[in-house]
């Protein structure tokens, strides 16, 4: 019977506490977790609770149980807002939510929660040593949200629902003015309008393609040497040749 | 960060000296002080925000029944003393006056568990709860008293016992409901309107007579509505009284003022530009001279709670005028005639702006978005929202009962609205694992079916959580093996091939091998490995949703190939025991599916499918003289010699080397909602298998087998098993089959069949964890060898009842008991009688 097993079965919370503590310090978080779980309720309301709750949450965090870590750190922050560890806890709670953020094609509730918490952290602790990392993560998550929004809009283009694509690309462009997907969004808007216009009934071809030309001009105005320039020029040439028949 | 502290009125700042706590028993003094976060030396205002917040926080804990704070001021310093009284914990509850089981329910519903804090709130809440509960059951005057006293059987003094005394009054019944002042409508008619307040009546045993104030109030509204329906626009109940008319009996008296009966005069429409007066009048369906029915008028304009209602406001909403408002206004009342103006504000046309999806933890955005019929920038249509909900439900990825389109950010000025589809993912994979005795030995089956698979992530390690999911593909694998046969099959369905258009690709492959039963005495009962039948096949199909005539239509094409290989396999069907056969066919089908949201339990809608399976007409060009072969075969089979039999086998091998046939099938099913939750499913099925060249004949494969549960089992010969309950599996022979041969030999399938089925279904529960419904059926079917003998009235009929359970992880399970009214064709005797059928797997 190892010391650890003895501590697990012991009735004495003190024994468990010191065992959990030394396991935690040795980096054996999984083992220490089992002990923390047992003693957290017993110490509730006692002076040691502050330290125990933090270490318990941190062990979850180190074990990458982000779901529980986020919850426990949140609890810690609301119970001990004046604690020396509050800053670290708030940061780690936010990181836990950010880590739970799934693939951009799935529901992004966790991402949004992570973003809010990270933003809140930076507002409360602008001077924190974690601030840089938090900013980095905010950038990463918001790019993910942008990618989601952009890919959904692009999806309408793919299934040839061009008016839907134009409408949602417009929403995308107004929602994310500084997005790295901005050029692509302008281009897909142009292509949607071009496809839509050239497949319209006769009387509508001209006005719709003229609108496409405006979109082309916006694109090359913003991104004169962008990745999509060549493709856009091709479309423009094609539009011009179609419009010759309508002049 | 320091806590906010502000002085209240002329509060002064003091430095805290000593802090003490009196009265703490369960919690030690330090714990309480630590909780207040007050520290000796802190500066606080008295009176001030911080101190009052501390007291509020202590109260909020719900741990103390009394909190007092004493401040002793000593110059600039203040000593704080908290005097608290801890809330006792519950030790034991005793409930007197009612049955033990009811008492248990009360304890459960109010959480009266050992250790619960006994606050004033808990006591009041419990008292109110019990009184109300019994009021609802008709015990109008029940009394509940709750007392607590320190627990005697424990040493811990802060525990209390709770004693609940329930004094049930006798159940009050309504002796009589009287109406006074009604001339136009009889008492009985008005009483009938009162759905939940009823006079006592021995005959009406299903609804007790009881008086519940809220129900009575609702029922009074119904009475007035009844008057309104009959043209009495001004009818009202002036007053009502409740009289105790005997022991436990009450009489309700309602004084009614009926007013005049009105008729509709002129109806004018104002503000309409989209629809003409005439169109609106037709939609309204009320005419000059009709009895003025206020309730109907309201419903014709806008019926609450029915998004599909055929009313005026939906006429506007379905054409995009989401922000329209319609108000009827009485403009002139002359004698008994009322003129109306229907004032319409059409508002701006509404367009969908942002379409979002939440709750998709597994299914990828594009798999969902491509199914949406509400698209950004599109004109608003309520019908499109309903159709989207229906189609999302039918994917099977989400719980159809929890599908919830939420309208957000309605903006009447810009004419835009957003929709969020809130989804709840449900298990879309099924596993089938079976073992049992059947077909002469142990049979084991392993089937896996993944309905929301992601084949592109098959080799992506990270996507296994626990399986690659979310691309909307269906992937299934099945293996079944016994000592006599083995079958293996796999299939993959991609609903949007290439992602551009809803073109479904379906691939499947199967391989099976069957051994003969060994009749040799020494090894009897074991498979004879020298005598086997092998089938290998595959198919590839494409299906496309159509836009014309409407978007419920699908057209599909498939090419299938099967290779049959026989070795020493001389049984029933096959005159050639050694040989092979190839079955190459093209299937084209058109289908229409318009059933409602829940695919397990559709309530309305219909589905149809018509398919034709065709093989190339080889006999047109292969130069074989099948007429001569047929004649020679006829002659050889009469001979009845070994040489004759061999020649027959040779000829049959030549006739069936490449199978040549065509097969046409039709299937139609309608769902109708009846009273309550009952749903009627009506279904018809027809099938016909024919030959291009009558001398070559119809092959023994791909035939129809009627009877029983309709489960395929191990079908080796492409047979189609048609369900007909009340008869043994595949037992119902063609009606025109000769009666002289023995039944075993004759069971080689039919070429024509028809079937009619009615099923009355009732849902018991439609929870995502398990959907259960009960059903009653009546059905009739028949099969034939030849069109000349086809007779739609010659059928095997049956009726019975059963139940279905659908669990996402196991698919559909069910049992049916059917009674066959007719004898099996070819046998003599009475009705077939009762049969029990077990249903496994999906079958609608």
Image: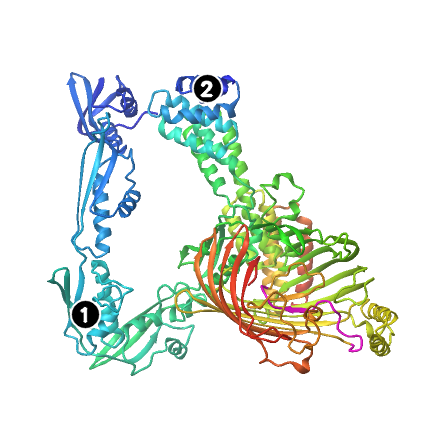
* Local crowd size for mark 1, using a 10 Å CA cut-off: few (<14), some (14–19), many (≥20): some
Picture coordinates of residue B649 (x, y %)?
83, 68
Q: Is residue B370 above or below residue B464?
A: below
Q: Are marks 1 and 2 in contact (CB under 8 Å)?
A: no
Looking at this view, is B435 or B303 the one in front? B435
Left/right placement of residue A181 relative to residue B202 reads right
Secondary structure at numbered mark 2: helix
> Which quadrant does the C terminus of chain B fall into?
bottom right
Looking at this view, is B473 or B755 the one in front? B755
Magenta residues? B693-709
On the image, numbered disc 2 is attached to which residue?
A7
Q: Residue at x 47, y 29 (%)?
A: A92
Using the rendered image of the protein, determine whether residue B804 is visible from the camera's viewpoint: yes
Picture coordinates of residue B211 (x, y %)?
20, 60
Looking at this view, is B354 or B682 the one in front? B682
Q: Is residue B53 above or below residue B318?
A: above
Protein chain holding label 1: B
**Is the image coloured rainbow, by chain, by secondary structure, or in one colour?**
rainbow
Report how far apart the C-alphas of labels 1 and 2 lie in the structure.
78 Å
- Which quarter of the picture shows residue A193? bottom right
On the image, numbered disc 1 is attached to which residue?
B236
Q: Residue at x 21, y 81 (%)?
A: B336
Left/right placement of residue A160 relative to residue B338 reads right
> Which quadrant does the N terminus of chain B fall into?
top left
Picture coordinates of residue B752 (x, y %)?
66, 75
Protein chain holding label 2: A
Secondary structure at numbered mark 1: strand
Q: Is residue B25 magenta?
A: no
Badge number at residue B464: none
Using the rendered image of the protein, determine whether residue A82 is visible from the camera's viewpoint: no
């Amino acid at each position: 019977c190892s010391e650890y097993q003895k501590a697990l079965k012991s009735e004495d919370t003190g024994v468990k506490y010191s065992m959990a503590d030394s396991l935690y310090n040795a980096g054996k978080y999984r083992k220490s977790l089992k002990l923390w779980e047992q003693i957290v309720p017993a110490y509730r309301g006692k002076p040691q609770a502050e330290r125990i709750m933090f270490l318990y949450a941190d062990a979850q965090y180190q074990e990458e149980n982000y779901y529980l870590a986020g919850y426990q750190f949140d609890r810690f922050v609301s119970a001990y807002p004046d604690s020396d560890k509050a800053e670290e806890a708030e940061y780690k709670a936010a990181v836990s939510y950010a880590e739970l953020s799934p693939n951009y094609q799935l529901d992004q509730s966790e991402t949004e929660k992570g973003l809010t918490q990270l933003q809140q952290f930076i507002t409360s602790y602008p001077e924190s040593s974690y601030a840089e990392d938090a900013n980095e993560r905010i950038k990463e998550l918001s790019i993910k949200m942008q990618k989601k929004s952009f890919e959904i809009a692009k999806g309408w283009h793919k299934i040839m629902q061009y008016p839907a694509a134009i409408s949602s690309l417009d929403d995308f462009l107004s929602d994310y003015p500084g997005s790295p997907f901005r050029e692509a969004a302008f281009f897909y808007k142009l292509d949607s309008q071009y496809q839509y216009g050239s497949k319209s009934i006769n009387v509508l071809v001209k006005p719709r393609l003229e609108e496409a030309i405006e979109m082309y001009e916006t694109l090359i105005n913003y991104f004169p040497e962008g990745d999509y320039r060549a493709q856009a020029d091709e479309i423009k040439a094609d539009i011009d040749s179609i419009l010759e028949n309508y002049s | 960060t320091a806590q906010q502290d502000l002085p209240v009125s002329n509060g002064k700042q003091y430095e805290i000296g000593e802090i003490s706590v009196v009265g703490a028993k369960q919690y030690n003094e330090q714990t309480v002080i630590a909780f207040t976060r007050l520290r000796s030396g802190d500066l606080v205002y008295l009176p001030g925000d911080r101190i009052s917040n501390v007291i509020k926080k202590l109260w909020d804990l719900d741990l103390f029944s009394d909190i007092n704070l004493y401040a002793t001021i000593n110059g600039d310093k203040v000593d704080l003393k908290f005097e608290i009284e801890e809330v006792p914990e519950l030790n034991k509850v005793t409930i007197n006056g009612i049955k033990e089981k009811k008492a248990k329910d009360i304890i459960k519903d109010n959480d009266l568990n050992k250790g619960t804090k006994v606050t004033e709130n808990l006591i009041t809440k419990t008292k109110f709860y019990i009184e109300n509960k019994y009021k609802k059951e008709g015990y109008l005057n029940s009394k509940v008293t709750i007392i607590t006293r320190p627990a005697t059987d424990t040493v811990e003094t802060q525990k209390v016992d709770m004693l609940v005394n329930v004094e049930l009054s006798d159940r009050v019944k309504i002796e009589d409901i009287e109406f006074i002042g009604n001339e136009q409508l009889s008492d009985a008619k008005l009483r009938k309107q009162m759905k939940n307040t009823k006079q006592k009546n021995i005959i009406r045993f299903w609804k007790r007579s009881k008086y519940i104030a809220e129900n009575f109030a609702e029922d009074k509204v119904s009475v007035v509505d009844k008057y309104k329906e009959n043209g009495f626009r001004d009818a009202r109940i002036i007053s009502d009284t409740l009289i105790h008319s005997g022991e436990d009996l009450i009489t309700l008296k309602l004084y009614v003022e009926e007013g005049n009966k009105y008729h509709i005069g002129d109806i004018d429409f104002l503000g309409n530009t989209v629809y003409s007066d005439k169109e609106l009048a037709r939609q309204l369906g009320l005419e000059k001279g009709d009895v003025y029915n206020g309730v109907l008028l309201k419903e014709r304009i806008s019926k609450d709670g029915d998004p599909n209602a055929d009313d005026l406001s939906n006429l506007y909403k379905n054409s995009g005028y989401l922000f329209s408002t319609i108000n009827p206004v009485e403009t002139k009342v002359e004698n008994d005639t009322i003129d109306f103006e229907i004032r319409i504000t059409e508002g701006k046309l509404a367009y969908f702006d942002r379409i979002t999806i939440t709750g998709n933890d597994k299914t990828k955005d594009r798999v969902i978005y491509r199914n949406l019929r509400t698209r950004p920038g599109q004109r608003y249509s309520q019908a499109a929202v309903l159709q989207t909900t229906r189609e999302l439900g039918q994917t099977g990825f989400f719980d159809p009962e929890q599908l919830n389109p939420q309208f957000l950010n309605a903006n009447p000025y810009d004419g835009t609205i957003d929709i969020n589809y809130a989804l709840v993912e449900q298990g879309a994979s099924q596993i089938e694992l079976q073992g049992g005795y059947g077909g002469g030995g142990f049979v084991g089956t392993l089937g896996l079916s993944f309905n929301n698979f992601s084949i592109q992530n098959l080799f992506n390690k990270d996507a296994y959580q626990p399986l690659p999911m979310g691309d909307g593909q269906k992937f299934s694998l099945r293996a079944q093996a016994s000592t006599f046969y083995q079958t293996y099959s796999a299939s993959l369905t991609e609903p949007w091939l290439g992602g551009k258009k809803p073109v479904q690709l379906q691939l499947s492959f199967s391989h099976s091998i069957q051994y003969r039963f060994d009749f040799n005495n020494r090894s009897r009962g074991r498979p004879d490995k020298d005598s086997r039948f092998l089938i290998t096949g595959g198919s590839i199909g494409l299906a496309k949703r159509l836009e014309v005539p409407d978007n419920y239509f699908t057209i599909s094409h498939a090419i299938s190939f099967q290779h049959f290989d026989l070795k020493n396999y001389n049984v029933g069907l096959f005159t050639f025991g050694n040989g092979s056969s190839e079955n190459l066919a093209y299937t084209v089908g058109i289908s229409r599916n318009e059933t409602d949201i829940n695919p397990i339990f559709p309530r309305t809608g219909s589905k149809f499918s018509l398919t034709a399976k065709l093989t190339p007409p080889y006999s047109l060009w292969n130069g074989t003289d099948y007429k001569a072969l047929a004649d020679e075969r006829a002659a050889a089979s009469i001979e009845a010699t070994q040489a004759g039999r061999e020649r027959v086998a040779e000829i049959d091998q030549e006739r069936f080397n490449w199978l040549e046939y065509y097969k046409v099938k039709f299937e139609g099913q309608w769902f109708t909602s009846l009273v309550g939750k009952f749903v009627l499913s009506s279904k018809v099925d027809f099938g016909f298998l024919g030959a291009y060249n009558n001398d070559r004949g119809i092959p023994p494969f791909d035939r129809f087998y009627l009877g029983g549960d309709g489960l395929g089992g191990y079908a080796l010969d492409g047979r189609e098993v048609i369900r007909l309950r009340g008869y043994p599996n595949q037992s119902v022979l063609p009606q025109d089959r000769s009666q002289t041969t023995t039944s075993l030999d004759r069971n080689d399938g039919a070429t024509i069949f028809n079937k009619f089925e009615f099923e009355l279904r009732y849902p018991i529960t439609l929870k995502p964890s398990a959907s259960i419904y009960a059903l009653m059926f009546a059905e009739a079917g028949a099969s034939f060898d030849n069109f000349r003998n086809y007779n739609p009235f010659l059928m095997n009929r049956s009726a019975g009842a059963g139940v279905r359970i659908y669990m996402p992880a196991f698919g559909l399970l069910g049992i049916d008991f059917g009674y066959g009214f007719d004898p099996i064709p070819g046998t003599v005797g009475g009705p077939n009688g009762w049969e029990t059928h077990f249903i496994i797997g999906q079958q609608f």
